[in-house]
Amino acid sequence: MKRVFIAILLLATSFVAVQAQETTAEHQKVIAEFISNVKQQNKEALAAKVAFPLRRDAPIPPVKTKEEFLERYNEIFDESLIKAIVNSKPDKDWIAMGWRGIMLEHGKVWLDDNGKLIAVNYQSTIEKRKQAALISSDKKELDKSVRKYKRPVYLLETQKFRIRIDNMGKDQYRYSSWKLQSKMNETPDLVIDGGKVVFEGTGGNHYYEFVNNGYTYECVFTVLGEKEAPPALVKITKDGKELLSQNATIIR
């Protein structure tokens, strides 16, 4: 479950700088291998060492298989990113971040301790265009009341509900929910504006909070937690009393 959220490590980077460590000789060995494969355009070798799914900025779908990685390689690794990787020094430009892995340039690229690629927090021009096209298409599939947003953040499903979190700009978020059997081109059952994101501690765990008529809705995302912990959780409380708590699946 932890790998589903590895891309969120970019959001946590500013909170974990105090835990940064110098890379070990073993780290430098796997970093050098990764750099060499990128330099030589050895896509097969790179694809063999990816922790799937490799998440991309929503609503771009994650890269789920080796075949998809090879197909989409040039979308992700453009000239600018390749240059940053190839020119990097394993002992100077990469930082070990404990269990989170090893990062380049404040989280632009993440490897685990075994050299597996676990996140690319960089967006090429091709992906930016793709994201814009997908957002345009996504808006057409939504009810007109929720078509306006800056970018989608999450789409979740619980046992009973389908929930969207959208970034409205200026650090404001919107919560929209439908019954699971409903379609998103139907009027949402609930829309809450003015939400915020809250980070907890230094591990990257965070939640989105929305308040409506005395009720607080929280969509909680666990980056650092027990193995059995669900990747996401939806909670509703009122006056400090929990009224509902449901595990959620991240659709995108």
Image (spheres, grey):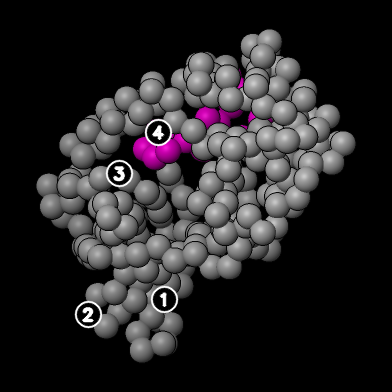
Q: Earlier in the sequence, mark 2 or mark 3?
A: 3
Location of residue 130 by image quarter = top left
**Picture disc at residue 60:** 4
Q: Mark 1 points at which residue?
A: 244
Residue 46 visible within the image? no
Q: Which of marks 1 and 3 is nearer the N terminus?
A: 3
Q: What residue type is labelled 4?
A: Ile
Disc 3: CA contacts within 10 A as few (<14), some (14-19) or many (>=20) = some
Residue 213, numbered label: 2
Q: Is residue 250 among the parts visible in the rendering?
A: yes
Question: Which dot marks residue 151?
Answer: 3
**In-front residue for pair 79/7:** 79
The secondary element bearing badge 1 is classed as strand
Residue 3 screen position, x and y as percent? 62, 45
Badge 2 or badge 1: first in the primary sequence:
2
Which of 119/159 is in front?
Answer: 119
| Residue drawn at the location 41% of the way across and 76% of the way down | 244
Q: CB atoms at circles 2 and 3 under 8 Å apart? A: no
Pick the front one: 183 or 102:
102
Three-letter code for the amino acid on which mark 2 is drawn: Asn
The reply, left or right, for residue 241 in relation to residue 223 is left
Q: Residue 11 placed where, x, y %? A: 50, 51
Q: Where is residue 106 in the image (x, y as percent from the top left)?
A: 58, 43
Quick check: marks 2 and 4 in contact, CB under 8 Å? no
Could you tell me residue 2's position as x and y percent?
63, 51
Q: Relative to 248, is 185 above or below?
A: above
